[in-house]
């Protein structure tokens, strides 16, 4: 059963009679496709309809909490209708530009790859509204990534589902239990299967609205569903969250958006209140706060999460400038460079400052590795969250380089805040050797058309120590001052058995040694040269003799 939080009374529904008229108006406004599928019948509670979804389906969100606010109703404006019915508000029908673009792009993509599904973008918009309030009012950057992670409550079985960690904290920063992540609220195990790259940046990021919207589209279209069929649409929504109440809420927003929406600037959408236990980032500059409830709206006496906590808490005292986070900055981190496979000697350090410029303690800072790299923090994590100390600083764990060379970025951001991230550029260089030599001094000879009996083995070192994993290039070269690849004489064989005289995909082993593949001689006799060059510039030249056997 999904825990429900954040339910508020609908505007203007002050009596049971008025509420009944409002619901009737909504039902009357829905088209044929909006009728709820009756698969198993409506239980009237918060359990999924019988037969609607497989019992072993974990649900995309892990049945995390969601926003249960319903859209405003459009008054039928009939003479007999109550004049107190709520009317459609432009704020609720507005969808932030990047978020709306992501939904429509996902619809077009699915139309190309799975046309039979007939995914409507309004369904993605309805789920995005219910799950995160359209990425918390469109608080995304130019690439569609949320300014700070959107995380659901910890799924530790205390009021929510029990889902133990499946991603080592990579997506949700929790290595003990899972949490729903991003504007479409995927749990990490579901994202691992359904994650998509919707904006073409080479990454699958659940906190990117383009990636998350496309992933949600694929998830909803699973199997042979046709979302133009009411029963299939209902099953798709129930697979996202196993709750009939969830289905009714999503359906309401789906029908509302189908009747009309408009685009609003990013960051200016309606910001929903925090769900119990989830991340509640402070508004991004320019974000419109949630509308203030009218006097007629009554507070919900139910707690926002098990164990207490009202949905209408008393406002906390305004923090003083010395307690207010003003900025997060680089605290003197040096150059970040490491050889592939090694740990970075320098560690990333940031400082949190208050509004007066002084140090600020107990600020949560999230360090995230971005870019095409296999570098990781200690423990194999790509994201870690730590808290500043009394001096306002916090140091990230040791950064371990992987085998991919090149540059990548580590971003430090105040968790749950809209302050700019502090970027750090890190570079991984290839493993190097400054010396390479044969491991033995045997003469290498072969008869024309035969193979060399002895193999060539070499060992690479760097500053006298074993150089493992170093790239080596082997080339049969000509004589002369400027040698080039020889077109005759000894050769290697490729996978198809064809002669090749240059090999590039070679690396030394853990002990720094490398044994070359077999070498063959053609019909031309003479003395030839084999050159081996390492990453780092070390070179050795080996002689190969092709001579006819003695009579």
Image (spheres, rainbow, N blue to C red):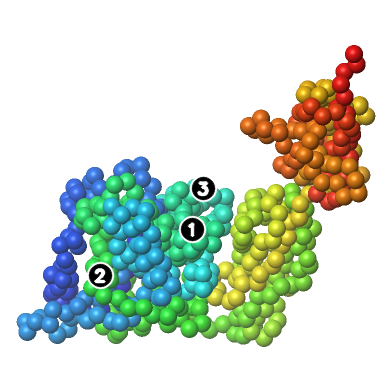
The residue that disc 3 covers is 166
**Residue 178 to residue 103: above or below:** above
The residue closer to the viewer here, 513 or 15, is 513
Coordinates of residue 357 in the picture (x, y in percent)? 69, 83
Q: Residues within 10 Å of mark 2 (few under 14, many from 20)?
A: some
Q: Is residue 193 visible?
A: yes
Alpha-carbon span between mark 2 and mark 3: 37 Å
The residue closer to the viewer here, 159 or 194, is 194
Q: Residues within 10 Å of mark 3 (few under 14, many from 20)?
A: some
Sequence-wise first label, 2 or 3: 3
Q: Are marks 1 and 2 in contact (CB under 8 Å)?
A: no
Sequence-wise first label, 3 or 1: 3
Alpha-carbon span between mark 3 and mark 1: 21 Å
What residue lies at 65% left-to-right and 75% top-to-bottom? 328
Q: Is residue 54 left or right of residue 84?
A: right
The residue that disc 2 covers is 258
């Amino acid at each position: 059963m999904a825990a429900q939080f954040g339910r508020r009374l609908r505007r203007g529904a002050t009596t049971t009679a008025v509420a009944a008229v409002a619901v009737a108006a909504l039902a009357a406004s829905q088209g044929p496709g909006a009728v709820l599928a009756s698969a198993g019948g409506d239980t009237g509670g918060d359990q999924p309809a019988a037969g609607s979804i497989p019992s072993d389906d974990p649900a995309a969100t892990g049945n995390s909490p969601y926003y249960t606010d319903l859209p405003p109703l459009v008054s039928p404006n009939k003479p007999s209708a109550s004049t107190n019915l709520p009317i459609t508000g432009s704020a609720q029908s507005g969808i932030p530009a990047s978020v709306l673009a992501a939904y429509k792009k996902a619809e077009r993509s699915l139309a190309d790859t799975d046309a039979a599904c007939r995914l409507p973008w309004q369904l993605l918009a309805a789920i995005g509204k219910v799950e995160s309030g359209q990425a918390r009012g469109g608080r995304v950057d130019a690439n569609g990534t949320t300014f700070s992670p959107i995380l659901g409550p910890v799924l530790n079985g205390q009021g929510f589902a029990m889902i133990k960690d499946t991603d080592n904290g990579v997506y949700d920063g929790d290595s003990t239990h899972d949490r729903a992540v991003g504007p479409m609220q995927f749990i990490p195990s579901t994202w691992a299967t359904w994650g998509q790259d919707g904006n073409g940046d080479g990454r699958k990021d659940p906190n990117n609205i383009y990636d998350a919207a496309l992933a949600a589209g694929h998830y909803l279209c699973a199997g042979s569903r046709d979302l133009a069929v009411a029963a299939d649409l209902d099953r798709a929504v129930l697979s996202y969250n196993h709750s009939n109440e969830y289905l009714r809420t999503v359906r309401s927003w789906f029908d509302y958006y189908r009747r009309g929406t408009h685009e609003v600037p990013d960051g200016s959408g309606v910001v929903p209140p925090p769900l119990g236990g989830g991340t509640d980032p402070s508004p991004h500059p320019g974000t419109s706060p949630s509308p203030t409830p009218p006097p007629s709206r009554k507070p919900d006496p139910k707690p926002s999460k098990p164990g207490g906590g009202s949905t209408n808490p008393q406002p906390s005292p305004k923090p003083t400038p010395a307690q207010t986070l003003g900025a997060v900055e680089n605290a003197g981190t040096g150059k970040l460079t490491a050889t592939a496979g090694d740990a970075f000697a320098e560690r990333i350090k940031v400082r949190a400052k208050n509004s007066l410029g002084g140090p600020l303690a107990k600020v949560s800072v999230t360090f995230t590795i971005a870019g095409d790299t296999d570098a990781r923090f200690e423990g194999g994590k790509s994201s870690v969250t730590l808290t500043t100390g009394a001096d306002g600083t916090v140091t990230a764990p040791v950064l371990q380089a992987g085998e991919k060379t090149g540059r990548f970025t580590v971003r430090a951001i105040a968790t749950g805040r809209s302050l700019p991230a502090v970027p750090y550029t890190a570079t991984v260089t290839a493993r190097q050797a400054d010396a390479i030599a044969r491991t033995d001094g045997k003469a290498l000879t072969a008869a024309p058309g035969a193979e060399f009996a002895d193999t060539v083995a070499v060992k690479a070192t760097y500053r006298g120590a074993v150089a493992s994993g170093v790239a080596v290039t082997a080339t049969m070269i000509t004589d002369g001052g400027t040698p080039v690849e020889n077109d005759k004489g000894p050769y290697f064989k490729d996978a198809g058995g064809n002669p090749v005289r240059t090999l590039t995909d070679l690396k030394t082993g853990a002990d720094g040694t490398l044994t070359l593949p077999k070498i063959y001689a053609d019909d031309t006799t003479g003395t030839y040269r084999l050159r081996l060059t390492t990453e780092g510039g070390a070179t050795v030249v080996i002689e190969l003799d092709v001579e006819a056997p003695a009579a």
